[in-house]
Image: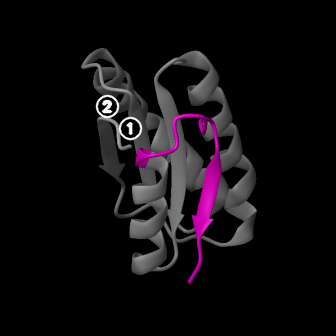
Amino acid sequence: MSVIQTVLAVDVLPDGAIEAAATFYRDYISRIEALVGQGGAAIVIVLPHAEADHDDWRRALARDLGRKHAPIRVNVVGAADPEATEALVDYLGGAPGVTGQYCPAHG
């Protein structure tokens, strides 16, 4: 059973992990807070593909937002493959027990 899920797609971030994290927090956290305020059961943040050195800040983002906004579920998907990304977003829409997770979408 799917729930009301909002998807926030971030198309471009810098290549460096520190710069990408700084850009994300500067440009997108206020948007996420506004989405939480609109209600709904879940938010999925889709980030562009990045190298493994981005995994730590992405995991922390997912974990911290998931904890902060419970019972609204917040998850993060790393979009390496379009079909895998779509499948993960669909899965998360019907997974009421999953929150605070970073899910890289590899093909």
Q: Is residue 102 or residue 92 the one in the foreground?
A: 92
Contact check, label 2 and label 1, Cβ < 8 Å:
yes
Asked if residue 15 lies left or right of residue 64, the reply is left
Residue shown at the point (74%, 64%) measured from the top left: 53
Q: Estimate how packed mark 2 is, as few (under 14), some (14 to 19) or many (20 or more) residues with alpha carbons within 10 Å.
A: few
In terms of secondary structure, where does tag 2 sit? helix
Q: CA distance from mark 2 to mark 1?
A: 5 Å
Farthest residue to the bottom: give it: 107
Q: Estimate how packed mark 1 is, as few (under 14), some (14 to 19) or many (20 or more) residues with alpha carbons within 10 Å.
A: some
Asked if residue 48 lies left or right of residue 102, the reply is left
Q: Is residue 11 or residue 104 the one in the foreground?
A: 104
Across and down, in percent, residue 79 comes to: 48, 69
- In the displayed structure, would residue 100 be above or below residue 46? above
Quadrant location of the C terminus? bottom right
Confirm whether the magenta stretch covers residue 96: yes
Report the amino acid beneath label 2: Arg
Q: Which residue is mark 1?
A: 28
Report the amino acid beneath label 1: Tyr
Across and down, in percent, residue 12 comes to: 38, 64
Across and down, in percent, residue 16 comes to: 62, 64
Residue shown at the point (69%, 46%) measured from the top left: 59
Magenta segment: 93-107
- In the displayed structure, would residue 36 be above or below residue 45? above
Confirm whether the magenta stretch covers residue 103: yes
Residue 9 has which mark? none
Residue 31 has which mark? 2
**Among the 4 quarters of the image, the one containing residue 63:** top right
- In the displayed structure, would residue 107 be above or below residue 97? below
Across and down, in percent, residue 19 comes to: 57, 53
In terms of secondary structure, where does tag 1 sit? helix
Q: Is residue 54 or residue 95 the one in the foreground?
A: 95
